[in-house]
Amino acid sequence: MKLKTNQLIWSAVLTIFALGFTACADLEEVSPTFDAEVALYDIPTTIDRMQNGIPSNAGAANERRNPGPTFSTFNAALGSTGLASVFSRNDLTAFAPTDAAFAELGLNPGNVRNQPGLREILLYHVVAGTVLSTDLTNTFVQTVNGQFIEISADNGTINGAEIVAADIRARNGVIHAIDAVLLPPSQNIVEVALGNENFSILVEAVVAAGFVELLATTNDLTVFAPTNDAFVDLLGELGFDSLEELIDEEDGIGLAGLQGVLAYHVFAGRVFSTDLSNGTITMFLGDEMTVDVSGPSLIDQNDRTSGIVATDIQATNGVIHVIDKVILP
């Protein structure tokens, strides 16, 4: 399968997913937790009216209130960033952290405006379209700030944060309350690798190959990252004591060979674990690799199998999956 084919399929999947997320549901489908007969208010106003508790009927003149979580800090954050108009004009689904969630980070209505990157954090809590709890599936979805959140319908969580109140209807969308603040990725792929001691040999190889800028600045990459143990096993398999020998020795693979090996671990496009399926994909190098989701594992062109031991480590410019064997073109 050629790279262009993979990119077309990936684009089609995203398009279908986006269409699914923009579909509106009837009010009768709302969770019975909230008797939303009429949704009179936009999202910011609804959140403002939730400061004293969640409304059980958003459209009633004399609103009844369900005791429980409040949202004063989220409301203050919207006001301080000027995002209230964005949240009121567009068809959106907002995942609203409770006051207790913000308090876990030491934030409250008085100091939340001082939080660095607050605007991008808030935009990381919003996806396009009205998505009720009954529409949620196990997948990753792009937020308004461009980064992705992981939705687990099985566990009722968003990036591990629990949905504590669902389907609070607003005039221009829906709000789901969550018990933790979602923080978008703040490091690129190289920075993530630098911060993980299990990737020190991989980082050494990336530097030697001259791929630092490529992996740090290119958007929408998927990297299958071998651990240090994987590189040690490769060196033993090929009869070398160090990465330097692998590159420099007369019978080594040389710099071009190392670049080819690393490029064989990179895919052009963000592929999360929920997107993987059995079949072949074409890597950045141009060679094919086989994916076996039953492992899950990768099979290279030498029929060597590498297990995928950790998935979906997000970076600002892509996603990393950890593998236990270096794959070879």
Image (cartoon, rainbow, N blue to C red):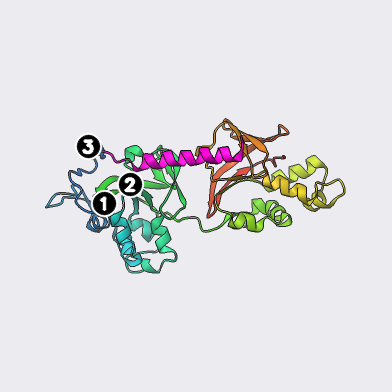
Query: Which quarter of the figure has residue 267?
Result: top right
Front-most of 65 and 323? 323
Q: Position of residue 147 (x, y in %)?
A: 47, 52
Number of the label disc, if any, that sits on residue 68: 1
Q: Residues within 10 Å of mark 1 (few under 14, many from 20)?
A: few
How far apart marks 1 and 2 lie (CA) works out to 10 Å
- Magenta stretch in the rendered image: 1-28
Q: Quadrant of the N terminus?
A: top right
Name the dominant secondary structure of the magenta segment: helix
Q: Assess whether mark 3 and mark 1 are in contact (beta carbons under 8 angstroms).
A: no
Q: Which residue is mark 2?
A: 164
Q: Assess whether mark 2 and mark 1 are in contact (beta carbons under 8 angstroms).
A: yes
Number of the label disc, if any, that sits on residue 28: 3
Side of 96 relative to 289 (left or right)? left
Disc 2 marks a residue whose amino acid type is: Val
Q: Quadrant of the C terminus?
A: top right
